Image: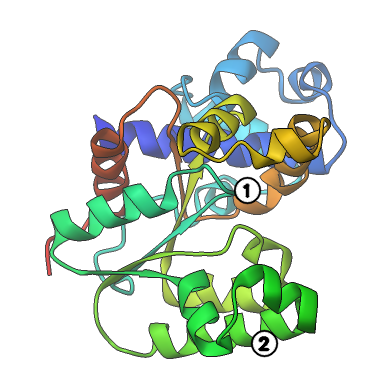
Amino acid sequence: MMKHEALLTTVGTRVRALRERRGLSRRRLSEVSQVSERFLAQLESGRGNISLVRFADVAEALGTTPAEVLSGASPDQDAPGVIALLGVRGAGKSSVGLKLARERGVSFVEIDHRIEQAAGLSLSEVFELHGEAYYRRLEREVLSRVLSQGQSLVIATGGSIVNHRENFTMLRGRARTVWLRARPEDHWNRVIRQGDSRPMAKNPHAFMELKALLAAREPLYAAADYVVDTGGRDVGEVARLVSSAVGGTRA
């Protein structure tokens, strides 16, 4: 059931991202595809188990094919042994990644920590002293080294990797990518529970900016091989969902 749930969530997320990228309202997509607006809402939320015929109609209305929407959404036992977790701060990449790695008997790597080690600086210092271009170069170098080790791993990526086409393309080509999707409220509350109230204290508009950031990145995160909803779930349950979605066994 977990594998089916992850599949429906991934497909629904991609349908929504494609619709928004084409500037279509749900009502307009309903008119073109002849699939009810109510069912489209269920589909996009990962709760609609659509028939193949209706799915083909939706894909055609979005200017694509069912195969393209489904691309990467089924486990590939011959895929690389690296699972890469995506999401902004508060997605749970560190906690879920560590749990998942332990359960699968593999190592866990946080890319931003490796970047800090390579630079000899904190991330904030990297950006302040050298800028984003330097960070992206280090990100690419660290990713290349990690992905070239030839061993199964779970990695937590930097939240903004989806904004850099070259680095994200390299990651997608050499790892199974999983977006840990959550509502803005979930991200916010998790950061606060971790004891960090700085975003709210320093910027009264921080939450609205978080919502805008998530909305802007959603179509990019939706390109991940799998999408797993984390809202209302504990770390163990999310880790099991990810493991079920990507398939494979312990190392």
- Using a 10 Å C-alpha cutoff, classify the residue at mark 2 as few (fewer than 14 neighbours), some (14 to 19) or many (20 or more): few
The residue positioned 56% from the left and 79% from the top of the image is 170
Residue 2 image point, x, y percent? 27, 33
Residue closer to the observer: 203 or 148: 203
Three-letter amino acid code at the position of disc 1: Thr
Is residue 198 found left or right of 129 in the rendered image? left
Of the residues under marks 2 and 1, which one precedes in the sequence?
Answer: 1
Q: Quadrant of the C terminus?
A: bottom left
Residue 207 image point, x, y percent? 74, 31
| Above or below, 156 relative to 33 | below
Is residue 63 found left or right of 10 in the rendered image? right
Q: Quadrant of residue 58?
A: top right
The residue positioned 24% from the left and 51% from the top of the image is 99
Residue 201 image point, x, y percent? 73, 35
Q: Quadrant of residue 29?
A: top right
Mark on residue 137?
2
Mark on residue 116?
none
Mark 1, residue position = 65
What colour scheme has been applied to the protein in the rendered image?
rainbow
Q: Is residue 177 visible?
A: yes
Residue closer to the observer: 245 or 152: 152
Element under disc 2: helix
Q: How many marks?
A: 2
Three-letter amino acid code at the position of disc 2: Arg
| Above or below, 156 relative to 153 | above
Q: Are marks 2 and 1 in contact (CB under 8 Å)?
A: no
Is residue 166 found left or right of 83 in the rendered image? right
Residue closer to the observer: 167 or 92: 92
| Above or below, 230 relative to 45 | below
